[in-house]
Image (cartoon, rainbow, N blue to C red):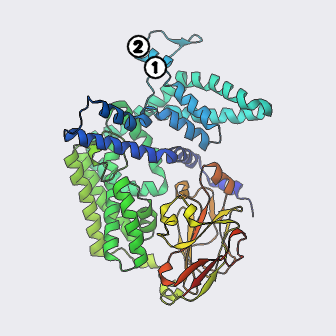
Amino acid sequence: MKNNDTTVEQKETVFNKILGAISGSFAPILGVLAGSGLITALLSILKSLGWLSAESGTYSILSAAGHAVFYFFPVFLGYTMANKLGANGFVGAAIGAALLEPNYVTLVTSQAQDVSFLGIPVLLASYSSTVFPILIAASIYALLDKFLKKVIYKDLQMFINPMISLLVIVPLTILIFGPFGTYVGQGLAFVIQFLSDKSGLVTGAVLGAAWSFLTILGLHWAVIPIAIANLGASGLDPIIAMAASAPFAQIGMGLGVFFKTKDKQLKTLAGSGLLPSALAGTTEIITYGILVRYKRTMLYVGIAGAVGGAIVGALGVSATAFALPSFLSIPVFSPIGVFAIAVFGSLLIAMMLTLVFGYEGKNDLGVGKKTNKEFGLGNVKKEMIASPLTGHIVPLSKIEDPLFSKEIVGKGIAIEPTIGVINSPVEGVVTTLFPSKHAIGVTSNDGAEILISIGVNTVHLKGQYFTSHVEQWDEVKKGDLLIEFDLEKIKAAGYDLKSPVVITNTESYVEVKPMKTGDVEASAGPVLKLDA
């Protein structure tokens, strides 16, 4: 396999590196953030209904469960950011913890005067719930760690490197990085608030329309820290509120596709994406399964998101806690009535546009290319599928993603790769190529629809470490190179590389039967037998 490191580094801009680092540090804790936000929403409901008093011990304990991750945010981000940059995550966490350690917190809460470090005046500030200070500190720590690994004798690095890092980075954070990061966060929040004050309607419309596309490009990671910083500073944030109309618009579009399509596979895909979107605010299935596939739906989501965002921005809705927008998190937003009208309006607009105007455009089907009927989908044949990867076969049940482990997408196998190469398992056509290049679909000349997904949740890498050698609708032969991926860097980023290989039109076959266990080589096989 050829080495693509140089090519990747040349293409990767500083901005992309920054976004990649931020997204890589937030992605592992997004679930606990969303879960904690839902606890806050639940407490708000119980309190408003009079079922739970804010003075009760029960409320205090549940409030601790909901707010802990936000209060100790520097600790969590210190760990994930350091890990993402290849440094010791526990040292990164210790740097964040130092900002919340009782001795330092006492200096802040007591409003101590003339505090200095080695004669240098210290600007005291509270860093609970902050984002930017620890992101800066962990980044500088990662650079220092790389230097220390070069100059410190290997057998001493286990304790010398952490000691030096803490001695250097913690004081620098309190003296420089902390105040600077605080001012950066406050400055960005001021700019957004200024725009909202000038015209909340325009700001909300732009953010609501653009949020889905910022998410696809990974640019939303540059905005989320600002929202969390707003909540830490004032307890209110308008950004998440204005952006919330976008995921609701996607839910509406997904509902429209679900009701309109006659394609069983697409209906299953839309249906499986609606539940996590509605209850947890995780719209990846709809985003990458429908939105990027059917370009016409992007217009619907953009229009619906703009309408909802404009209402929210014009009437001053804010989030009172961080939560991924969903039905369960509606109580987090205030005033709740205005927010509900705005987001349900976005949902209905997107759904009606999809139902009335349809979700397919000519370009979605590949005009001038072969259509699915020409691939034999209506008349599948018995077929043997070769392995697209070199590695070790594992059952689909071992995949953490329930879409694969529960065989919702289709039956098949999973392969834990040892070489970062995907070869075509059949002769046919590339019918799906995700923008993130983490997954590819090939339809064989005998009608089998084969989806190969590299690892679990690697869509969050936004194409980093993946190189595609084909385009959608390219004709391929068995053994042709489809995608190369940097196996070691993806592992280092914390992703599970067990890769599903599934037949998405399983219902067209009498049986989809695994043919092999243990180790397998790419283009060898067969690994799956399809009985028609």
Q: Is residue 331 above or below residue 183?
A: below
Looking at the image, which is closer to me, 96 or 202?
Answer: 96
CB within 8 Å, label 1 to label 2: no
Count of number-bearing discs: 2
Q: Is residue 528 above or below residue 271?
A: below
Q: Position of residue 508 (x, y in %)?
A: 49, 84
Q: Quadrant of residue 209?
A: bottom left
Image point (59%, 53%), residue name = 495
Asked whether, in this view, residue 188 is left or right of residue 387, the answer is: left
Residue behind mark 1: 105
Q: Position of residue 72 (x, y in %)?
A: 46, 32
Q: Is residue 449 above or below residue 38?
A: below
Amino acid type, label 2: Gln
As helix, strand or loop, the secondary structure at mark 1 comes to helix
Image point (35%, 56%), residue name = 247
Amino acid type, label 1: Val
Does residue 316 appear in the picture of this structure? no
Image point (45%, 48%), residue name = 31
Asked whether, in this view, residue 310 is left or right of residue 129, the answer is: left
> Quick one: label 2, few (<14), some, or many (20+) residues within 10 Å?
few
Q: Which mark is residue 212?
A: none
Q: Quadrant of the C terminus?
A: bottom right
Residue behind mark 2: 111
> Quick one: label 1, few (<14), some, or many (20+) residues within 10 Å?
some
From the image, state whether disc 1 or disc 2 is nearer to you. 1
Looking at the image, which is closer to me, 90 or 256?
Answer: 90
As helix, strand or loop, the secondary structure at mark 2 comes to loop
Does residue 344 appear in the picture of this structure? yes
Q: Position of residue 315 (x, y in %)?
A: 21, 45
Task: Report, in whole angstroms, how far the alpha carbon at label 1 lies from the one at label 2.
Answer: 10 Å
